[in-house]
Amino acid sequence: MAAPILLLGSLLAMSSFLALAYDVKPLQDFCVADAKSSVTVNGLACKDPKKAKAKDFFFSGLHLAGNTSNAVGSIVTPVNVAQIPGLNTLGISLARIDYAPGGINSPHTHPRASEILTVIEGQLEVGFVTSNPDNRLIAKTLNKGDVFVFPIGLIHFQRNVGWGNAVAIAGLNSQNPGVITIANAVFGADPEIKSDILARAFQLDKNVIEFAQSKF
Amino acid sequence: MAAPILLLGSLLAMSSFLALAYDVKPLQDFCVADAKSSVTVNGLACKDPKKAKAKDFFFSGLHLAGNTSNAVGSIVTPVNVAQIPGLNTLGISLARIDYAPGGINSPHTHPRASEILTVIEGQLEVGFVTSNPDNRLIAKTLNKGDVFVFPIGLIHFQRNVGWGNAVAIAGLNSQNPGVITIANAVFGADPEIKSDILARAFQLDKNVIEFAQSKF
Amino acid sequence: MAAPILLLGSLLAMSSFLALAYDVKPLQDFCVADAKSSVTVNGLACKDPKKAKAKDFFFSGLHLAGNTSNAVGSIVTPVNVAQIPGLNTLGISLARIDYAPGGINSPHTHPRASEILTVIEGQLEVGFVTSNPDNRLIAKTLNKGDVFVFPIGLIHFQRNVGWGNAVAIAGLNSQNPGVITIANAVFGADPEIKSDILARAFQLDKNVIEFAQSKF
Amino acid sequence: MAAPILLLGSLLAMSSFLALAYDVKPLQDFCVADAKSSVTVNGLACKDPKKAKAKDFFFSGLHLAGNTSNAVGSIVTPVNVAQIPGLNTLGISLARIDYAPGGINSPHTHPRASEILTVIEGQLEVGFVTSNPDNRLIAKTLNKGDVFVFPIGLIHFQRNVGWGNAVAIAGLNSQNPGVITIANAVFGADPEIKSDILARAFQLDKNVIEFAQSKF
Amino acid sequence: MAAPILLLGSLLAMSSFLALAYDVKPLQDFCVADAKSSVTVNGLACKDPKKAKAKDFFFSGLHLAGNTSNAVGSIVTPVNVAQIPGLNTLGISLARIDYAPGGINSPHTHPRASEILTVIEGQLEVGFVTSNPDNRLIAKTLNKGDVFVFPIGLIHFQRNVGWGNAVAIAGLNSQNPGVITIANAVFGADPEIKSDILARAFQLDKNVIEFAQSKF
Amino acid sequence: MAAPILLLGSLLAMSSFLALAYDVKPLQDFCVADAKSSVTVNGLACKDPKKAKAKDFFFSGLHLAGNTSNAVGSIVTPVNVAQIPGLNTLGISLARIDYAPGGINSPHTHPRASEILTVIEGQLEVGFVTSNPDNRLIAKTLNKGDVFVFPIGLIHFQRNVGWGNAVAIAGLNSQNPGVITIANAVFGADPEIKSDILARAFQLDKNVIEFAQSKF
């Protein structure tokens, strides 16, 4: 799973120092993120609006397939405020997801966005799990042109169940939706969550937990 | 221009009686719109969450081209809460837009959403205009895989400037973004805005205004 | 129409470089806009609250008639955060509108505010148009002491239909409501929206469009 | 003080059973309050939007002076969602305030709105007090055409310090701003706050407290 | 782990059919949840405010220790809108957590609240994990009188590392914060998430996954 | 009453120059307040998130009783963003309140938070007053383990009616809730509200008002 996370990591690296705005209405026509600002606020400092250019609202390359040669067989190409500074304060972003045959987009949550996903190519099995106490799995197999919704904060996943590659485009209602990949956050935290805590939480042997931790 | 508007109209008709929620956070995992509810509130009444099904979060057919044989040479296929009841309260939707060669998506605003548009096929010229006093046009020509952003409330448009058909997918951060097509709202209001008001506003002869009104 | 827009323009010029806050609750008793701050955020930097003075919450002169000698016969005197720095973050503003006999406040939208208008003097015909697909005109003739409401984002207008001058005061629920005058944004964009796009959108001859563009 | 409060009371009585919306964005073009709905929610149920009429957005009579013959010498004429059902969800309202010579609008808070007040006639002394620990009084004398701002939640007041009557119009950024008149809520609560609590809080003799309570 | 979840489940059962409001400001002084209402909205229907009683704002018994005899050695006693109907729309709740020696409050998220936790008795090791790509563990050992914060949406946990029982009280900024216990949602979803998806996501053998699933 | 207010004052002094965020969602995992930032915005500037430490989310000493030797016989120990910089943007805080026998927490409002209070020790009489026109007192006597709710913006108070000391812990849904102690703001404003205004508002003799003012 390292690969897509790392890519996502590097793509988000730019924004991780920045405190990006979501859920806060634009307070002017737009507020293009100012990459040179030294100020870090709850929401990103803006360029002088008179200096905003069309390229501040632009991104290129979403038609290009990502490289799915990694442990989970999928890769996310995000198009959020880290890629398009003009998205700052606007509360919307996109992502392209490529899946090798059998590839999964591992169970994860977006703490700051709901997601609406369209299958551009291939066949996906998708699902989300409701919160306690029911933990109901709501799942469906999607084909080309099908659309599915993942509510904010809920654990969800996709798997390519078709014969070939699959491609999806997802809309998210935040310019900085955030991603918490469950396996990485639980078994790959840095420093590690103590293995006896996880053993009791997951009711697994401590050795199994430590083996899982060694993978992340 | 009648055709896409009419289609959009019929698609939105279901929702026009409903008072749909946007910009209000989900107050539970989800709140699937209850089509049978007689209550009309600022936000739609929900089904019993235990009765929510996967199909409440599902839509099919976004891979199908719309019919662009109309006055403006374009057609919008919306995927919002009128099509997917599970989008209720989630603040996100999609739309597919098809353009015949030379077709335009006429200048319009979304009063309740910013938009992020991806070109799936073809070549589009797109732009938006900033508010008073500058009224700056920020425009760009987009190719396959290019992405562009239209900030909430601003007048924007697209035109197919390629040789063949063009297709775009747009994400909008509202489950009920609303559309105000400028030409239709100004010249096609029902009943009409008096022609001498429009003549003075647009500094055109009253006959020209009335001719324009006759088209909508 | 140039004159009121220009005046509005110059009044807003101060604020156009600023990224002004609306729809964001005050996070302290008040946050008086700091005109000397070099920081541009989604919401304006504040003065040290201990240095706030009564004059920061004050404006003078709303009893004075504006000069309506311009193409549309009306003039807006805004009282928003550009005039009263203490309005920053408070989400409210006022405007006075003067109308010569027959003068209009041209069809426009406020992307960030609903408006409640009171007729102080004279007689006005007012209206707004609902969004697609109905584009219903909801209109009324108002006399002294009458109040009318224009919902956020909808196209609306006023016309002086009385014998003498008319005066209105409008409350708006944003300290930076924004104005998009339709005629100016569509026919007066800078650079221009290409005339063949507008010709197809408005179903008018290209020459007519170009004539209209020459007026703005 | 009874009179203005009573009038305000009777005007608000209609709305006090209703759970009115503020600070919740309109989720459609408008949501005219349905006076016949039996549903009480956090926000008022709406009429079918197709049945909305111009009169739903209309109020008449704000040019008429209120009767200031009461203990405090002032009277408020509110124009909020209780008077204009079309204000429901729109987050804006007005009020007219009449002051006899020497009349006061007693210290009060609006728990759900900031206020911007314009003097239409006469001369007012106005002020607000900041929160703990400073409790700074920020005050000013206003003349015709002057505008002043009272931030949300802060205690504020006005007094007519001119020779004749005074009139003000106030905009408030809520369709249901709420009023807490300090003297009435503290000394006129029903049932009474025990006098020894108030005696200790105000560091006054219990007899003085009970005398004050007898007035409300 | 079943026990605390089941208890939480039964406590939340009342509210799970209800669509409870968080993050939506009160639109009146209060909106006591009406347990008899058949209407399900994004936010709960209110009782007539004139019928609100002191007991609608009241809960009793938070001084009583919960029963920690369960798989994880801890138990949560929630005090949210399911227990206090007067919390409806107010955006705040509490919980008491009891921990047997060595007991854990298993890694979980609150999709709708940040949490501030105070140790009333005993010693706790607590932590949360940041989102991708860093997945940083921020952890601390707390003693009586210590306070710690868990930001909204992030995975967090507590463990009793003292010699005796431990007790904490947590404030949460939602009247319906929601809980997603990671182990339960991932390994105990109903129906199950397919074991090969989890095997690939957690990089564990399918048998290990199925063994874990058998525990939940 | 001076003592607790002064303490609260000194505790809040740090934050009073800062423009602290409430009611604005976190726009990233967290935004630890940067005490060294010179920028004052609607919401506090953040430290580089990579430099956030566990101690930024930590406070110690809430088990310690405050000193209630003051005019009102109570003392508040706040734990908000002034004490825990990691609370910035998270919208939650706590406070401990100690009461000597007979001590009161004087009538006050929180302009930016609802409150949920738990009695840890002793017996309290608590109440809040609804807004105009009813000004209903909703009151109850609480014992150890009882919980009560005070809705945002309403005047509320507590009094120790037990034989010994009392202790309560309150959760508030803002990291900077604000406090307006009615007696202090009305009779202790600086500079003073003119005594004849208060005399008319409270229908008390001017001498009584001036005596009360001399106490604050």
Image (cartoon, coloured by chain):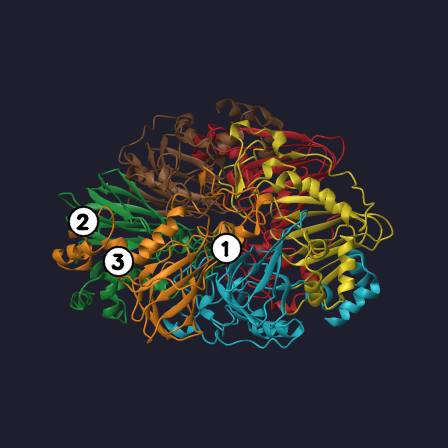
Chain colours: A yellow, B red, C brown, D green, E cyan, F orange
Q: Are marks 3 and 1 in contact (CB under 8 Å)?
A: no
Write down the quadrant of residue B29 in the picture. Answer: bottom right
The answer to whether residue D182 is seen in the rendering is: yes
Instruction: Specify the farthest residue to the right.
Output: A163
**On residue F120, which mark appears?**
none
Identified by mark 1, the residue type is Lys
Determine the chain carrying the residue at label 3: F
Vertical side of A139 occupied by B23: above or below: above
User: Residue type at mark 2?
Assistant: Lys
Residues at marks 2 and 3 touching, judged by CB atoms closer than 8 Å: no
Where residue D13 sits, quadrant-wise, is: bottom left
Q: Which mark is residue D50?
A: 1
Give left or right: position of B145 versus B107: right
Label 2 to label 3, Cα distance in Å? 15 Å
Q: Which residue is mark 2?
A: F194
Q: Identify whether C61 is placed above or below E186.
A: above
Disc assigned to residue F183 = 3
Q: Residue E93 at x, y = what percent?
A: 49, 65
Mark positioned earlier in the residue sequence (2 or 3): 3
Q: Amino acid at mark 3?
A: Ala
Dot 2: within a 10 Å radius of its alpha carbon, few (fewer than 14), some, or many (20 or more) residues? Answer: some
Question: Marks 1 and 2: same chain?
Answer: no
Drawn side of residue A44 relative to residue F119, left or right: right
Helix, strand or loop for disc 1: helix
Q: Residue drawn 58% across and 77% down?
A: E67
